[in-house]
């Protein structure tokens, strides 16, 4: 009897994987067959099973056993409040398609609350992908608050600021931070932060009921470098003092300690909360981000994680 139940569970696991690869990752049945090691006919049957068993709705709605196991281990290892691990595509293990859908689902859950919430939002490609998955909603009771400046040093808008996009999707009041990501000096930062609108936004961010942030790596492919906020010399200087990652432009080391000095002194972002009693979701995946994600969890800069299978396995290796 137990063996029959286990076989049925395994069959549904395979069907869920096939459904995810087909409907979410956009794989053909031939590609699914190759990735799962089955015939094309078997792949077709698994996709059909995913539909007939109602595993596929708008999002994948099946608890894949391995993902659940990884989620539980990460939660226990790093003391997380919540962790969701989505399936990986073996050909593109750094893809953010799956985590974008999971992140959107979590955002939607909070936005559906009838009680007013302050929802703080960081920036980055993963968060922007999440927001693109949000359905139109009517949530005027909530306040959407930016954690960091939405301008480049020349006054142009940053490419991946998402607060306005969230507010448009949710029809909610929003508070973009009208500052460049970095001040030109420590003195200028103090002046900017003492302006009443900025002070009010920073206070709202401090009171956030839930926070969503991306997690950036600190190498020569770092988002802060690629997007033009830091130079290669800045990256090298941070690496010399042990930098592994950044959240809302705050650079930190492997223990999750925000690094003192360097351009961190000029970051205009809201201060990072450490060991917050409220959920702070880090949404990120990919080998390049493993050390950054681990450092953020170790230092309690995030207490919830949405990532994929491949990244979760690497996070648990050490």
Image (cartoon, rainbow, N blue to C red):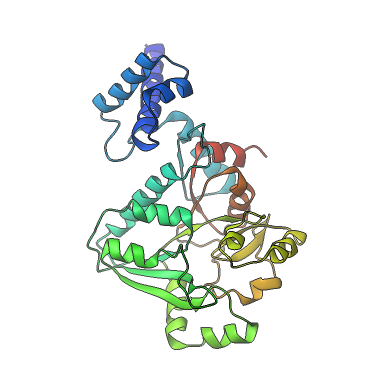
101, 274: nearer the viewer: 101
From the top left corner, tell me how far across and down residue 232 is, in percent: 69, 62
Name above or below for residue 157 compared with residue 18.
below
Query: At x 27% / y 57%, what residue is drawn?
Result: 112
Q: Quadrant of the C terminus?
A: top right
From the top left corner, tell me how far across and down residue 236 is, in percent: 74, 61
Say how many tags the image has.
0
Residue 196 image-quadrant placement? bottom left
Left or right placement of residue 97 versus residue 73 in this view = left
Query: At x 49% / y 78%, what residue is drawn?
Result: 155
Query: At x 33% / y 57%, what residue is drawn?
Result: 110
Residue 52 image-quadrant placement? top left
Residue 258 image-quadrant placement? bottom right
Name above or below for residue 286 compared with residue 221.
above
Q: Quadrant of the N terminus?
A: top left
Pick out the residue farthest to the right. 240
45, 138: nearer the viewer: 45
Query: At x 45% / y 58%, what residue is drawn?
Result: 279
From the top left corner, tell me how far across and down residue 211 is, in percent: 44, 61
Name above or below for residue 293 compared with residue 315.
below
From the top left corner, tell me how far across and down residue 14 is, in percent: 40, 23
181, 174: nearer the viewer: 181
């Amino acid at each position: 009897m137990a063996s029959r139940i286990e076989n049925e569970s395994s069959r549904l696991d395979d069907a869920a994987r096939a459904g995810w690869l087909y409907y979410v990752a956009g794989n053909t049945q031939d590609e699914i067959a190759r990735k799962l090691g089955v015939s094309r006919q078997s792949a077709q049957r698994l996709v059909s099973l995913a539909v007939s068993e109602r595993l596929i709705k708008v999002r994948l709605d099946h608890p894949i056993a391995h993902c659940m196991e990884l989620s539980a281990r990460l939660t226990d290892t790093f003391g997380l409040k919540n962790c969701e691990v989505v399936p990986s595509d073996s050909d593109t293990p750094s893809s953010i398609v799956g985590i974008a859908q999971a992140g959107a689902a979590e955002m939607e859950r909070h936005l559906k609350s009838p009680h007013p919430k302050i929802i703080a939002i960081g920036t980055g490609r993963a968060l922007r992908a999440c927001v693109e998955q949000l359905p139109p909603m009517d949530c005027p009771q909530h306040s959407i608050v930016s954690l960091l400046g939405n301008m480049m040093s020349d006054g142009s808008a940053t490419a991946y600021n998402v607060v306005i996009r969230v507010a448009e999707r949710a029809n909610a009041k929003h508070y973009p931070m009208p500052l460049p990501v970095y001040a030109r000096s420590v003195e200028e930062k103090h002046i900017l932060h003492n302006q009443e609108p900025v002070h009010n936004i920073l206070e709202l961010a401090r009171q956030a009921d839930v926070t969503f942030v991306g997690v950036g790596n600190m190498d020569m492919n770092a988002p802060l470098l690629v997007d033009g906020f830091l130079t290669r010399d800045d990256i090298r200087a941070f690496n010399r003092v042990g930098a592994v990652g950044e959240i809302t432009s705050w650079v930190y080391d492997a223990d999750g300690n925000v690094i003192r000095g360097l351009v961190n002194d000029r970051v205009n972002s809201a201060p990072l909360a450490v060991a917050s009693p409220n959920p702070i979701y880090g949404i990120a995946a990919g080998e390049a981000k493993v050390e950054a994600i681990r450092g953020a969890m170790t230092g309690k800069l995030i207490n919830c994680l949405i990532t994929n299978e491949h990244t979760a396995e690497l996070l648990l290796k050490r």
